[in-house]
Amino acid sequence: MTEDNSARTVLIAGGGPTGLLLAAELRRAGIDAVVLERRTERVEHSRGMAMHGRTLQVLEERGLAATLREQGLFPWPRTPFGFLWLDLDAVGPEEFTYGFPQWRTEVALEAHAETLGVDIRRGHELLGLTQDATGVTARVRDGAGGEPYELRAAYLVGCDGVDSLVRKAVGISLEDHQPSHYYGVLGDIEIAEGEPVDFDAGLHADGVFGVIPLGPNVLRLMTIEFAEPPDADRASEVTVAELRASVARIVGKEPDVEQAQFLARFGGPSTVAERYREGRVLLAGDAAHSLFVSGTQGLNAGVQDAVNLGWKLAAEIRGWAPEGLLDSYQEERRSAAARAVAHARAQMALMHPLETVTPLRELVEELFRFQDVNRHLLTMTAQTGYPAGDGKNPLTGQHLPHVTLRTAEGERNTAELLGTGRGLLLSLGDGAGPATALDGWEDRVDGVTADATDDLPAAAVLVRPDGQVAFAGDADDEALRAALTTWFGTPR
């Protein structure tokens, strides 16, 4: 039996952060979403710990940031580049990196998705798929012992991780970026209150050993080795003995650790899918890219994929998408992944082989004394921007800053204004009001008039549903109408 929801439904394989947020984005735009997650229950441990300030901005626009802060989200005191430490005084909080367990982010995103009406099916595993000109048919198995069934949808998005079944099913290969192979183990250990901690953490000749506090009396031990051990078996269960041996190869002695609350293995090459779309099947998150762990890009890249794709896919299904809008997802996000890979390769080149790169590290560390260098590297790590328009205004192509505006209805923050899931046109100062500028686009774009502000140096600012500024300039500029047409289609 086939469950046919092909007209206005998107099927998402994978219920991690990327899949859950993408489903929520689709529901905000009026599109049904079904999430298939093979795990029956969430594991309350996770590898990922780092959240970029830009990711936090996205979650704040969706009303989630306050919850994360209440649950212990905190800014890292330092941000590394090749395990050299950048100066955070050079930037604002949007370029900070924050500490927060990924599984807790998943909890918040799942609650958000359920509130919006997303159909989340735990214990349901994608077995295979076929597609035609009008939709995708997925074969699914209910892990609770039910019979396999078929599910029909307009599109299918693979958010099913590095070993993506979806990616393999449609024949999309990975580009392996050399030299970027590495191997690592992490373990969360409990220490007695007041127990002295004696770990030789830092960068060593054969790798990196990190010690990260996770909470009261809990530490994360993490290794990164640049040469994978010859006896490494990626399919076997991770053990404390493997963690101890990895630490010993890096620092010369094993840590005194007998038990761990959580163990995981990671590593491999940095990869990017050769394309993000095959017909009605798309990729997002780790299914589309696998990035160096020290670059802290995993969760963050997946979140940006989700918010970039969600509104574009919804526009395609609802019928108002301009030509090329859905293809712009690959153009923008694959380019971002390629930049992240280049960023990771540069960091690895600064770390190994240490005896060769030490003079270069010393020179780069000297450059970190210049605020412009810190600002550039921090921005490159945490910021998301896409080239747009003529680029004459510095806002164009960047994420809209969170600032408070004075409107006739009172003070409004731009984060709140972006919470609708629609486009946004800000008319600032004495420029033409949105009632005129938005003729024919009112069903897709909200208009807000506010006082001029130095924080947004433009009379008119057009913002996409993902928070990216599509135009900033004069309200009567023909380029504003062109940007409306480019991103929101022809006026009705």
Image: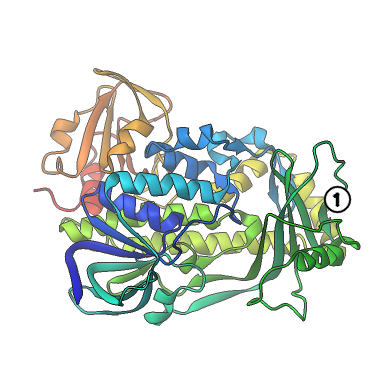
Residue ranking furthest to the front = 145
Residue plotted at (20% across, 28% down):
432
**Vertical placement of residue 261 versus 92, above or below:** below
Res 394 visible: no
Screen quadrant of the N terminus: bottom left
Which residue occupies 19% across, 60% down?
317
Q: Which residue is mark 1?
A: 199
Residue 126, position as x, y percentages in the image: 37, 73
| SS category of the residue bearing label 1 | loop
The structure residue drawn at horizontal position 44% and vertical position 52%, both measured from the top left corner, is 304
Q: Is residue 219 left or right of residue 333?
A: right
Q: In this picture, is 469 found above or below 434?
A: below
Is residue 268 something that shows in the picture? yes
Quarter of the image where one finds residue 290: bottom right
Residue 59 position within the rendered picture, expressed as x and y whole percent measured from the top left? 43, 41
Q: Label 1 is placed on what type of residue?
A: Phe
